[in-house]
Image: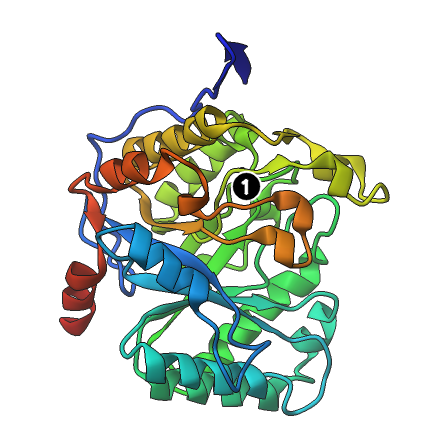
Amino acid sequence: MRRDSDRLQITVQPPDRSLEPVDFGAPFEPPAGRVLHCWGQLGVEDRPHLVEDGELSEYEATIEPQPGVVSTYAHVHDTSDGILDAFCQGAGNLLAKRPQTPLIVGLHVRPVEKVVASGACNESLRRMARCLRELDIPVWLRIGYEFNLSFDPHDTEAYKDLFPHIVELFRKEEAHNVAATWCSAAGSFQFRDPFDWWPGNEYVDWAAMDVFAPIGFERTETTAFLDRCREEKKPVMIPESCPFFFDWNLVDPDRPESFRDGLLEIGDIEDQWAWYEAMFELVRRRPEIKALTVIATDWRDGMFPFYGDTRIGSWDGLPPRYVAALSDPRFMHRQEAQELFQNR
């Protein structure tokens, strides 16, 4: 990254393979050369009785055409039988408001990954599998997402036990609408090789990587990750992404230094757009990337206020540029995505 005439310059390191489209035959995979337009992020577990989707509605009012997939989260953080019931209730309420909305679900299992792998949470996970099966929509389940963060990694062997354990459990419940998604922190912060946590080709439907810091576009590790996913014949999803230009006054000083790697001070609209340009260029270059989720939310109201406000409409001049980028014919929006999924 560098500054040129006060404008942030981000180098997109992965080489251009746009003339090498791929179709791996994964569940809910778009055709070769196409990318799902997704939005994040929505909490259904925290407010199961009343799903608040104001930021999604704001995005839809700002951006046309509409996203075809919505991301949300679920948490396994103890061994109680009903630990995922709030998520199931919230997901049901969301689908009542927004019928036939496919979901990306980040399944958070820290710090109990060993407990989950042991089978202690099986009944709760079975109920979740039945809940998602009965919703009868495509679901990408990001099992133990961002497992390789250097400052908060999953236990490697426990994760390689946990992932197949959950996949087999969902298969036994015949939750065939759930795509097992192996999601690394590639492109976000410092990290170990994510393939140290690889659970086995037979258990992974989709691969994924979350991309935030500008340095994520410049890492050789990002290229290595995408190349390996091609070799394993797995489509890649970007389920979490947005510009991270931190307000350092709001960052907990106890955060490890590796948390700060590659992160910049809050930028202006041109810095913001430099990040989006890099993201859209990455997606253009790498046709194994089949889904892109931008987190358009006001982080200042939550657990991570230093991330700032990444709602598209909060930045003057950003919406028309963003809409123009999404007009690229490779993107599949709501109507076309629905037609794709109805035919599966």
Q: Is residue 258 left or right of residue 50?
A: right
Residue 158 visible from this viewpoint = yes
Q: Residue at x 30, y 82 (%)?
A: 136
* Label 1 secondary element: loop
Say which of 234 and 137 sits in front. Answer: 137
The amino acid type, in three-letter code, at marker 1 is Ala
Q: Total label count? A: 1
Residue 172 visible from this viewpoint = no
Residue at the limit of the structure toward the right, as seen here: 254
Residue at the limit of the structure toward the front, as seen here: 316
Q: Residue at x 73, y 35 (%)?
A: 248
Q: Name the residue that disc number 1 marks.
A: 186
Say which of 188 and 93 sits in front. Answer: 93
Q: Residue at x 24, y 58 (%)?
A: 25
**Quarter of the image that includes the C terminus:** bottom left
Q: Position of residue 311 (x, y in %)?
A: 46, 48
* Crowdedness near tag 1: few (<14), some (14–19) or many (≥20) residues, C-alpha within 10 Å: many
Q: Position of residue 3 (x, y in %)?
A: 53, 12
**Quarter of the image that includes the N terminus:** top right
Q: Quadrant of residue 160?
A: bottom right
Q: Is residue 254 above or below residue 130?
A: above
